């Protein structure tokens, strides 16, 4: 294990949702700054990139209004006196690809490495992998429009006989038949990602992660994997969802669903499909809360599966409880 405080080494903090990644990243940044160094945090969260999706994505803090400026994509803002990048950077209507994340994150690393301690914290495994494995991702993985139309047509036909949630599950099961391992890393209700995977398979015969060449990263790195007791994490998830409602999640969701198309990729992740059913009087308030809790627990389980691979990396340390972690303990 190299020196975590070394400004020439990037520190990744990964783990399942609600495990305490953001809090630990800020704590370490403050500890490093006490020693006279500067630190910054890059978010590796595929939902916190969107403005207006605040409570549902468990942001430590949303970017103050007005959100957008010409150079916002690389403009940090302070959370607890630590510069944060790649939070609240685009509208929910805008597209943001794995290539976009990798390019932006790498440009920040190139600009600040050696001057700041760079901490990358988040639970989107593919984002983290794209940097650690230095994926060589084609900027434009063009999909034949006929292929895309065919896959989309299959999905639309399902929507005639099934609810959106059921249709999403059926398309996800179709993905499972091609690549079970890859399908386990994708939320069945993230229909955009499911359809995209099916499109790539139909055209290339491979899933997206298998057509991305890997290479040695352009920087040294360390990994802290927050891996709490599962039952304790699931209990924390349940409590956090309740707390989200207490601080205004229902009002936020109503505003988002009234403002944006519910079929947008940004609105397809956990929370909004459930709220849409509640809005349409298909489920009760109690069922709404319970379904968000259940789907979040399932998502956390998939994250455990993804990040457990990092335990084989000699640069990775496992932290069961981030509240008990300190740099001095290493």
Image (tube, rainbow, N blue to C red):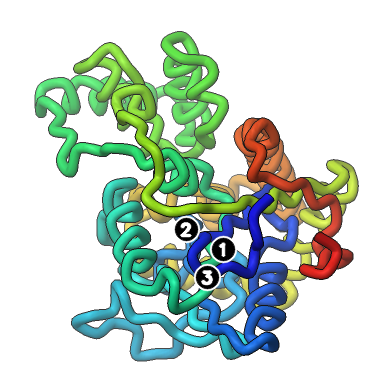
Say whether residue 21 is left or right of residue 48: right
Secondary structure type for disc 2: loop
- Mark 1 or mark 3, whichever is nearer to me: 3
Q: Where 295 falls versus 172 (above or below)?
A: below
User: Is residue 277 among the parts visible in the rendering?
Assistant: no
- What percent of the width, then of the height, locates residue 169? 51, 26
Q: CA–CA distance between discs 1 and 2?
A: 6 Å
User: Is residue 180 among the parts visible in the rendering?
Assistant: yes
The quadrant of the image that shows the C terminus is bottom right
- Mark 2 or mark 3, whichever is nearer to me: 3
Residue in the foreground of this view, choosing between 61 and 157: 61
List the residue tagged with mark 3: 7
List the residue tagged with mark 2: 47
- Quarter of the image holding residue 279? bottom right
Say whether residue 153 is left or right of residue 193: left
Secondary structure type for disc 1: loop
Residue in the foreground of this view, choosing between 191 and 86: 86
List the residue tagged with mark 1: 57
Secondary structure type for disc 3: loop
- What percent of the width, then of the height, locates residue 70? 19, 82
Q: Earlier in the sequence, mark 1 or mark 3?
A: 3
Q: Earlier in the sequence, mark 2 or mark 3?
A: 3
Please report contact status of discs 2 and 3: CB closer than 8 Å, yes or no: no
- What percent of the width, then of the height, locates residue 117? 53, 72
Residue pictured at 74% horizontal, 51% vertical: 226
Please report contact status of discs 1 and 2: CB closer than 8 Å, yes or no: yes
Residue pictured at 65% horizontal, 61% vertical: 3
Q: CA–CA distance between discs 2 and 3?
A: 28 Å
Q: Work out which residue is located at the far left of the displayed protein and give it.
A: 145
- What percent of the width, then of the height, locates residue 238? 80, 54
Q: Earlier in the sequence, mark 1 or mark 2?
A: 2
The disc at residue 138 is: none
């Amino acid at each position: 294990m190299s020196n975590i405080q070394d400004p020439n080494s990037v520190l990744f903090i990964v783990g399942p949702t609600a495990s305490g990644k953001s809090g630990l990243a800020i704590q370490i940044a403050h500890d490093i700054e006490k020693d006279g160094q500067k630190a910054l945090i890059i978010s590796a969260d595929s939902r916190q990139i969107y403005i207006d999706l605040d409570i549902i994505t468990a942001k430590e803090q949303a970017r103050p209004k007005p959100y957008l400026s010409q150079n916002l994509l690389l403009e940090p803002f302070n959370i607890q006196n630590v510069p944060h990048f790649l939070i609240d950077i685009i509208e929910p209507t805008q597209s943001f690809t794995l290539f976009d994340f990798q390019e932006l994150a790498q440009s920040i690393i190139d600009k600040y490495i050696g001057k700041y301690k760079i901490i990358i914290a988040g639970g989107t495994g593919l984002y983290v992998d794209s940097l650690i494995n230095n994926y060589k991702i084609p900027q434009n993985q063009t999909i034949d429009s006929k292929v895309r139309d065919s896959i989309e047509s299959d999905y639309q036909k399902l929507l005639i006989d099934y609810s959106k949630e059921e249709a999403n599950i059926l398309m996800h099961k179709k993905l499972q038949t091609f690549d079970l391992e890859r399908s386990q890393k994708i939320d069945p209700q993230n229909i955009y990602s499911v359809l995209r995977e099916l499109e790539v398979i139909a055209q290339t015969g491979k899933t997206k992660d298998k057509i991305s060449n890997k290479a040695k990263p352009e920087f040294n790195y360390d990994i802290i994997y927050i891996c709490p007791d599962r039952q304790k994490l699931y209990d924390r998830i349940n409590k956090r969802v309740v707390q989200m409602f207490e601080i205004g999640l229902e009002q936020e969701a109503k505003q988002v669903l009234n403002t944006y198309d519910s079929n947008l990729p940004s609105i397809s992740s956990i929370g909004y499909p459930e709220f849409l059913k509640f809005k349409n009087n298909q489920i009760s308030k109690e069922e709404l809360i319970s379904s968000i809790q259940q789907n979040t627990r399932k998502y956390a389980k998939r994250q455990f599966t993804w990040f457990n691979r990092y335990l084989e990396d000699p640069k990775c340390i496992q932290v069961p409880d981030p509240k008990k972690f300190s740099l001095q303990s290493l």
